[in-house]
Image (cartoon, grey):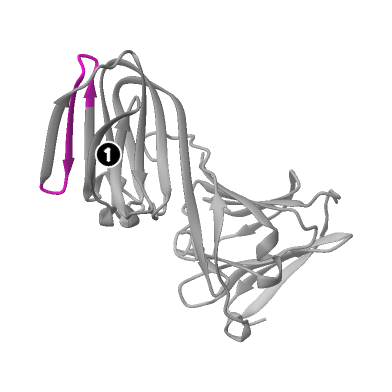
Amino acid sequence: MSILLLSLLLGFVARAFIITDLLRPRIQGLSPGEEIVVELQLHGAVNIAFLGNSTAVSYTSSAILLHLTINLSGNVSLRIGINEKTDVLPIGRSVEVKLRHWHDKKFYILIDGNLFYEGPGGFASVVRYTRIFGSLAVTNFLSESRLQIKDSIAHIGLQLGETLNLGFDAKYPHLALLDDSDNQNLYLYTDSSYVRAYKNVDGTYYGDNHIYNDRENGVIVELSNRPEGIDVAVNDKKIVLFRHLPSIANEAYTRLYIDPKYLPNLKNITITKS
């Protein structure tokens, strides 16, 4: 079914991020009303950086949009673009940092409840990575962000080593992974007996029906972009491995399409990096 024939639907779906690599947790920008919360155990100095777009090879080449440094002594410094700020705050070894792009479109940084920074928040929407490094232990990382879905499509950029996890409270969702040319590189839906999964190869769909663990309360779909291909699991059962076509492992799965009929049933999205 061509996505060009589907009706327009504009919506927002809450998503949670499970962070397994604290040097490179991914976010897709912070919209007004969203924040990141980091809880830390300080042993010296901690650095928190927001980075913009980067290549799949080296995220460290990204533009640094924000750089916050907190020392155990209480010295705090911040650089956002050309703007800099320093201050001394009363902090201990356990520190909570909130980085908030709020409804007034301003950006706030709160450290242990103390307002450290307030300023324009326009840069927050183009943040793609958070880097946390220094002499510390991260005890909690929470990203309350929202995934914008327009025309039933969300930009995800599923890279090698990453897994997209989708939770629905409906039993039979329809979804697809697309490239930037609207090619449905993987199409998947469930019914009462089977998962139907198909791979697009030069305009022809190849696939089969697979038995899965049917659950009354909904469906969990996991799509893992591995070096050998896309690994598909439904309700914690591996279904099939679709092998990559040559040289398109990173480019073929840039967007997620969800049948608009099932968008209200999408309850959570997690992206993890193994």
Q: Say if the magenta span includes residue 75.
A: yes
Pinpoint residue 73: horizontal percent, then vertical percent: 20, 14
Quickly name the residue at label 1.
49
Q: Is residue 251 visible?
A: yes
Q: Nearer the viewer, residue 22 or 181?
A: 22
Vertical order, 218 against 18 (above or below): below
Residue in the picture at 41% in, 54% down:
28
> Relative to 199, does residue 249 appear above or below in the rendering?
above
Q: Position of residue 80 (x, y in %)?
A: 18, 45
User: What residue is at 33 percent from the left and 13 percent from the top?
Assistant: 93
Quarter in which the N terminus is drawn: bottom right
Give the residues in magenta: 70-82
Label 1 environment density (alpha carbons within 10 Å; few <14, some 14–19, many ≥20): many
With 134 as the anchor, is 202 left or right in this view?
A: right
Q: Is residue 55 visible?
A: no
**Residue at the image position 25 percent from the left and 17 percent from the top:** 90
Magenta stretch contains residue 116:
no
Amino acid residing under circle 1: Ala
**Residue sitting at the far right:** 193
- Which image quadrant is residue 126 in? bottom left
Residue 197 to residue 146: above or below: below
274 w.r.t. 125: above or below: above
Tell me residue 240's x, y (percent): 71, 55
The reply, left or right, for residue 64 in relation to residue 17 is left
Percent position (x, y) of residue 107? 29, 47
At mark 1, the secondary structure is: strand
**Foreground pick, 23 / 84:** 84
In-image side of 117 versus 163 (left or right): left
Q: What's the magenta bit mostly, secondary-structure-wise?
A: strand
